[in-house]
Image: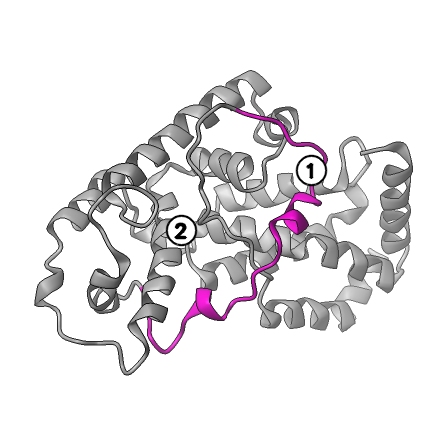
């Protein structure tokens, strides 16, 4: 971040901590989609990501006076978010952990032909697209928490290894090495099993009813298909630099960014309008 930009951000932080509501709203607006997308990939479901996003943004607001400008504001927010998500135990996959072995066995041996039509008159192509986005996102849950975080920071956000190392408290070299290994592991799994992103036999359209039966998608609540995508470049604007981590050619195009849900924005806005916010600003 250049000096002028850094000074502008610091000015917003100073105004916000002094009680300027508009300055605080600008800071929250600038990072809420970033926080939501990080939470979604780390936790695997929209509902859990929404809850975690609210927690993280409230934590950011209430700790704003501790920001000293030693790093960029977005790096500071990433650090808060990552620490929160690494220790987050309320999400579905904390109770039902996955592994690549389990996922692969389910693809190979799931009895998809024995399931009746459960589509409830929703077009199968739409449900297949919902399953594709859900499946590849849930697949991230096969990684341990830190590996998942490394993959998301490096592959979705393309964060510079020095900044990522600072966030994760490891050297840039260690981060680059681990990211390369994790990306290869993910690419190998996709290549072996997935017919959408690799050469595997698994086809989303064939597994729609099986996925509905196992509560992996809900025809009456299509989170991915109803979410508003945002340009990837918009997400790139939240960080300072981008570097070529390795020469792995796999395109992880399922890492699409989405706007944070309106209900999350409304809850944060309600907090900013509340007496509770006034008390915090005076503390």
Q: Earlier in the sequence, mark 2 or mark 1?
A: 1
Look at the image and say whether residue 21 sits in the magenta stretch: no
Image quarter of the N terminus = top right
- Quick check: 184 above or below 38? above
Residue displayed at 65% across by 31% down = 242
Q: Nearer the viewer, residue 155 or 248?
A: 248
Q: Quadrant of residue 162?
A: top right
Look at the image and say whether residue 235 sits in the magenta stretch: yes
Q: Which mark is residue 75?
A: 1
Q: Residues within 10 Å of mark 2 (few under 14, many from 20)?
A: many
Magenta: main secondary structure: loop
The stretch of residues the image draws in magenta is 217-245
Eye-nearest disc, 2 or 1: 2
Q: Give residue 85's position: percent from left, percent from top.
A: 51, 46
Q: Which mark is residue 137?
A: 2
The residue tagged with tag 1: helix, strand or loop? helix
- Quick check: 174 above or below 97? above
Q: Quadrant of residue 8?
A: top right
Q: Quadrant of residue 66?
A: top right
């Amino acid at each position: 971040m250049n000096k002028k930009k850094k000074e502008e951000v610091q000015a917003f932080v100073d105004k916000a901590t002094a009680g300027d509501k508009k300055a605080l709203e600008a800071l929250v607006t600038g990072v809420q989609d970033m926080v939501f997308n990080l939470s979604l990939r780390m936790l695997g479901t929209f509902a859990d990501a929404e809850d975690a996003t609210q927690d993280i943004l409230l934590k950011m607001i209430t700790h704003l006076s501790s920001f000293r400008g030693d790093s960029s504001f977005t790096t500071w927010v990433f650090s808060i978010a990552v620490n929160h998500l690494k220790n987050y135990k309320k999400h579905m996959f904390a109770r039902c952990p996955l592994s690549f072995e389990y996922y692969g066995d389910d693809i190979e041996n799931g009895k998809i032909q024995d399931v009746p039509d459960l589509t409830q008159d929703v077009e199968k192509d739409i449900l297949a697209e919902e399953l594709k986005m859900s499946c590849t996102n849930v697949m991230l849950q096969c990684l341990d928490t830190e590996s998942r975080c490394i993959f998301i920071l490096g592959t979705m956000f393309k964060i510079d290894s020095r900044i990522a190392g600072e966030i994760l408290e490891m050297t840039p070299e260690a981060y680059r090495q681990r990211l390369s290994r994790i990306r290869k592991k993910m690419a190998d799994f996709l290549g072996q099993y997935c017919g959408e992103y690799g050469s595997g036999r698994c086809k989303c359209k064939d597994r729609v009813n099986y996925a509905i039966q196992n509560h992996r998608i809900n025809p009456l609540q299509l989170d991915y298909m109803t979410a508003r995508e945002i340009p990837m470049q918009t997400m790139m604007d939240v960080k300072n630099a981008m570097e070529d981590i390795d020469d792995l050619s796999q395109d992880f195009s399922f890492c699409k960014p989405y706007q944070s849900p309106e209900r999350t924005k409304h809850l944060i806005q309600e907090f900013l309008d509340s007496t509770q916010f006034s008390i915090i600003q005076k503390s």
